[in-house]
Amino acid sequence: MPEIKDLPVFLQQPGPGPEPKPALLEPAPEPTPTPAPKPARKPFAINKTAVIILCAVLASAGVAYQLFINSAAQRYKQAGRLVEKARNTEAISAYSRIITRYPRSIEAAYSHYGIGDIKALQGDSQGAIASYEDYMVAAPDKDPKLASARFKVAELHFKEDRLADADYLYQNPVVRESDLAGRAEERVKEIAAINVRLAEAKKLIAKSPNKAVEAYSAVVAERPKYAAALAGLEEARAALAAYNGRPVAKRPAATKPPKPAPALTKSALKAALTKAEPPAPKPVQKAAPKPAAEQKPAAAPSPKAQFETCSAIWDAEKAQAQLSADQIFTKMKLGCDDLKQRLDACREAREDVMALQGVPPEARMAMELEIDPDWTLAKQLEQDKKIMQRYEDRRCAELLKTFPI
């Protein structure tokens, strides 16, 4: 093919020109590392050893809490601290919780004793006596506080002028064998001296009722609630009223001296001598007034009459009726409030004794085992003995025999 020399520019092949400068090479971007694949989650597995250790720690903590913080002994100490701070209402609540939660513990028995001390301090004699008696039932035999509890009950009776009950407890063998025997002996002598004064006053009723009233009044001034002194004073007053009602023999009225007769003349004297003198009239003797029949001194009311009178007063109080002055005086004289409290306590004690007689000890023990797994027949018999002792301490057999309840 022939060479074509002149070709159009656009058809000419370009010649070799200047070599192009090499382009600056940019660094290649670093490759992004691909994230490592996350390991698959393993299912949560409970470590049995850790669980056992945790349970053991919790159990130990619970045991420690019950032994050192929430135990009956610790609660009893806390109640004692409340008593020391004179927070008596809170202390009674604390003692009551111990009795409810730990009924068979020695702390429960001592809680009854503590409540008795607080109520005695507050002036609630009946409440204190009831708490001390609950302690005597719950406390173990030969507990060191038994003598003190009986002595404190006797002191409360003495304070309320229930001298017969106080004397009975002062002479209790448990008190006689304790450190309180000396103080109890002094009380017994004091009660005996009061009763001697009453016996002497009674002898004066027939001879000198006014002195009898004075003697009885002196005893009542010292023991205003003593039923025997009040009854004797009423008897002496009745005797004095009867004595003052006797008619007093009147003295004859003093006669005036006769006026001197005028002097007689001789003729008048002669005429008077010649006339017959009429016989002097006999003096009229008036019958002496018969003494009024002596009134017998009013005797002390019989137990039946006392109970009937007090029952009427109790019914009036129950109906919220206002008592008259005579009813209030009669209520104080007969000691109706004291009688009611003693009868209520003896009714409760009699029910407990009847329950003992109606159910064998083995059956009662079986019922107690539902509450206390450690209960035994020996503990049941000991508790039965204490219930009977409380019945005897209250002298319920004599009281229930005297009053028709």
Image: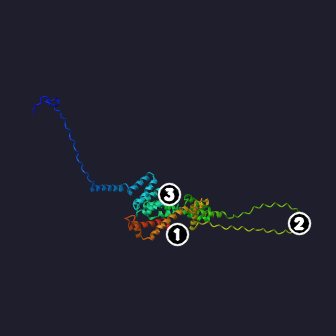
Question: Mark 1 is on which residue type?
Answer: Lys
Local secondary structure at mark 1: helix
Q: Which mark is residue 124?
A: 3
Local secondary structure at mark 2: helix
For label 2, the crowd category at 10 Å Cα-Cα, with few meaning under 14, some 14 to 19 and many 20 or more, is few
Residue 148: % across, % down: 44, 60
In the rendered image, the vertical position of residue 297 relative to residue 71, given as above or below: below
For label 3, the crowd category at 10 Å Cα-Cα, with few meaning under 14, some 14 to 19 and many 20 or more, is some
Precedes in sequence: disc 2 or disc 1: 2
Real-space Cα distance between discs 2 and 1? 94 Å
Nearest to viewer (mark 2 / mark 1): 1
Considering depth in this image, is 205 or 257 the residue closer to the camera? 205
- At a point 87% along the width and 66% down the height, the residue shown is 272
Tell me if I can see residue 351 in this picture: yes
Question: Mark 2 is on which residue type?
Answer: Ala
Considering depth in this image, is 58 or 188 the residue closer to the camera? 58
Question: Mark 3 is on which residue type?
Answer: Asp
Residue 96: % across, % down: 44, 58
Precedes in sequence: disc 2 or disc 3: 3
Q: Check contact, mark 2 vs mark 3: CB within 8 A.
A: no
Q: Quadrant of the N terminus?
A: top left
> On the image, numbered disc 1 is attached to which residue?
401
> On the image, numbered disc 2 is attached to which residue?
271
Q: Check contact, mark 1 vs mark 3: CB within 8 A.
A: no
Residue 361: % across, % down: 41, 70
- At a point 48% along the width and 59% down the height, the residue shown is 128
Considering depth in this image, is 321 or 386 the residue closer to the camera? 321
Q: Residue furthest front?
A: 2
